[in-house]
Amino acid sequence: MGEKVAAFGTQLKYVTSSSIVGSLTKVGGVKMSSDQQECTTHDSTGGFKEYIPTLLEPGSVAIEGYMAPADVGQVEILAHYKARENRDMQIDFPDGTSGAFGSNWTFSASISDFEYGEADVNGILSFKATLRISGQPTFTPVV
């Protein structure tokens, strides 16, 4: 069995500018799925529905953190949202030797939703965003 690795230190960055999105408390996983077309016929065994996979869905990645208006990466997230375009992004995991970055996901994404400045009376100012992946994401495992 492989080593277990703490998630602490995971980072999200823009590939082109190398801007790292700071003050993150959560980087959601890349959750892919596939569309399924029902193909049941009158002679399907036992009266059970049958399906075949069709198009693959690249999914989205939810991020959460604390509001940091001077953080270059958070500024870029808002600009990215306003630009209404796909940009290349990367999630780096601290699973390399001695906690260095090893595995990563790279993908093109737009920002499908953005929430900035939730102010709970007993909380810390926060932000949330969802990165909507476009096209095939690429996972590169640690070597």
Image (cartoon, rainbow, N blue to C red):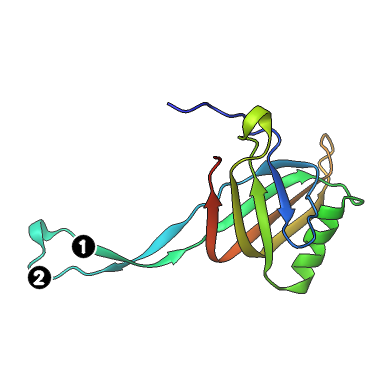
Above/below status of 23 relative to 87: above
Tell which tag, 2 or 1, sits nearer the viewer. Answer: 1
Which residue, as the protein is rendered here, is positioned at the far front?
143
In the picture, residue 72 is in which quadrant? bottom right
Q: Amino acid at mark 2?
A: His
Q: Are marks 2 and 1 in contact (CB under 8 Å)?
A: no
In the picture, residue 16 is in which quadrant? bottom right
Q: Which percent across, then down, holds residue 56?
A: 42, 65
Taking the spot 78% from the left edge, 55% from the top edge, the residue there is 18
Q: Nearer the viewer, residue 61 or 16?
A: 16
Instruction: Indicate left or right for 127 with 101 as reference.
Output: right
Which residue, as the protein is rendered here, is positioned at the far bottom?
84
Q: Amino acid at mark 1?
A: Glu
The label on residue 50 is 1
Residue with the mark numbered 2: 42
Q: Which percent across, then down, holds residue 27?
A: 65, 45
Quick one: label 2 or label 1, which is nearer the N terminus? 2
Above/below status of 125 relative to 1: below
In the picture, residue 7 is in which quadrant? top right
Task: Classify mark 2: residues with Cα within 10 Å, few (<14), some (14-19) or many (20+).
Answer: few
Helix or strand or loop: what does disc 2 sit on?
loop
